[in-house]
Amino acid sequence: MEKVVNHPRKAASSNTKRVNLALQGGGAHGAFIWGVLDYLLEDRRLEIAAISGTSAGAMNAVALADGFTAGGLEGARAKLEGFWRAMSDGAKNSPIKRAPIDVMMGYRNLDRSMGYHMMDAMSRMFSPYQLNPMNMNPLKDVLNSCVDFSCVQSCTSIDLFISATNVETGKVRVFDGKKLTSDMVMASACLPNLFQAVMIDNVPYWDGGYMGNPALFPFHSGSDTADIIVVQINPIERKGAPRTAQEIQNRVNEISFNSSLLKELRAIDIVARLIEEGKLDPAQYRHERIHVIENQSALMKMGASSKMNAEWEFLTHLRDLGRASAADWLDRHFNDMGERATVDLRAAATLTLALPKRDLSDPGIRDAVGDLYLADISVPPQPYEELTWPMVVPPFAAGDVLRLDD
C-alpha cells in the first residue's frame, strides 16, 4: 500500500481560481471526463475545491483524490490514466466488444456486437439476482485494485461528495469523502438491470444518476467557492424521435438522469434572482455561478451501446476529446471564473399540461420560466370555463398547443 503523503495545496496565486467540479455518469463516456480533468490538472489555472460525482464521475473523482493525496497534480493525472487503463485491460476478454467489420470501419458503437445484444436481451428477461446470484462484479475488482481508499479518505485538499439513490425511499444519499468506501462508489454506479443493489448499513442503493447526476446541493455548504463547473456527458437535447428499442431506452435514461440536475439548476437560478431582488439575504444565501464543459456535437453521434465500449483506443479518443473541450472552454472563460456564470439558466419557454398553473404566472418567477405554453391532454371544456385565466373556450380548437398571454 502506498504511503499517504497528502500533498497540501500551494498558496493560490493571482492566476489561480478555485472551483467546484460536478461530474456526470455515463459508462465508458466517463473517459471524456478523464480528459477534462487531465487538462485542468495539467493547465493548473484552476484549483479544485470540491468534487461531486455520480457513477463514472464518482470513479474519476476517487481516482483523482487518491492520486493527488499521494503524488500531487501529476500523481492525480497518473492515477486517472492507470484507472482507465485497468478498465480497458479488464474488458479485453469480455464478449461485449465491436464486431470485426466495425473495427475495420472505425465504427465505435456496439450495435453489431452479438455479445452486447445477448447481454441486453438477457438483462431485460432476467434480473441480476437470477443471472448473477454470486454477485460477482469485475468493475469493483478494478476499482479496488486501482484506488487506495485510505488515501481518498485522507484527502484534505479536495472535498468529495458521491451520490447514490436509496432504493427504499427514492431519495439521494450523498456520501462524504472522509468516510468513503469502494461499496459507496459502486452504489453510485449500480445500474439495477445489470447489478444487484449495493447494501450499505442494510440499505439497498442504486445508481446515483436517478436522483443526482450529479448532486449540486453539497457545494452550497460544503465548499468555499461559488463557481461550479458541470462536466456534462449526457445530452439534454436530442433532435428527432428514437425508433429502435435501444434508442428509446437510451433517451429515457438520458431524460431521467438529467432531470434532477435540471431541477437543481432551476432552483439555483431562482435563488440568484431572489438575491438580486433583495428578497433573500446574501449573508445567508449564496449566488452560485454555473459553468458547463461539454461537447454534445461529438458525444451525441455515439450511440448508447458505445457506453459499454472499453477498448483503449476508444477511451483515449474520448480522453483527447475531453482535453480539447476543456482547453477551448478554459481559454474562453477563465476570466469569468469568480465573476459571472457562463450558462444562462433561465428558460426561453415552459410547457405545462392540461391546465395553466397559477404560480407560473407569478411576476417573481415569470422571467425564469419564459414564454408559457399549454398543451392539450384531452381535458373536457368545463374546467377551462371555470378558470379566471383569460382564454377562449374550448382552448385547443386551433391546435394542440396554446400560448398563454400575460
Image: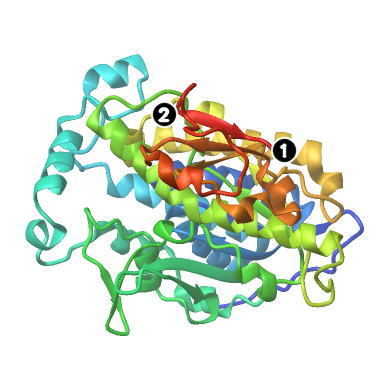
Q: Residue at x 53, y 78 (%)?
A: 153
Q: At numbered mark 1, what does the secondary structure look like: helix, strand or loop?
A: helix
- In the displayed structure image, the side of residue 249 where residue 223 appears, left or right: right
- In the displayed structure image, the side of residue 14 where residue 405 appears, left or right: left
Quadrant containing the C terminus is top right
Amino acid at pointer 2? Met
Q: Residue 391 shows which numbered tag?
A: none
Amino acid at pointer 1? Trp
Q: Position of residue 178 (x, y in %)?
A: 54, 80
Q: Residue at x 11, y 67 (%)?
A: 134
What residue is pinned by disc 1? 329
Q: Residue at x 83, y 50 (%)?
A: 340
**Quarter assignment of residue 139:** bottom left
Most distant residue in the bottom direction? 201
165 relative to 37, above or below: below
Quadrant containing the N terminus is bottom left
Q: Position of residue 253 (x, y in %)?
A: 36, 45
Q: Residue at x 42, y 44 (%)?
A: 382
Q: Position of residue 205 (x, y in %)?
A: 32, 70
Question: Could one spot residue 374 in this view of the protein?
Answer: yes
Q: CA distance from mark 2 to mark 1?
A: 21 Å
Q: Residue 302 shows which numbered tag?
A: 2
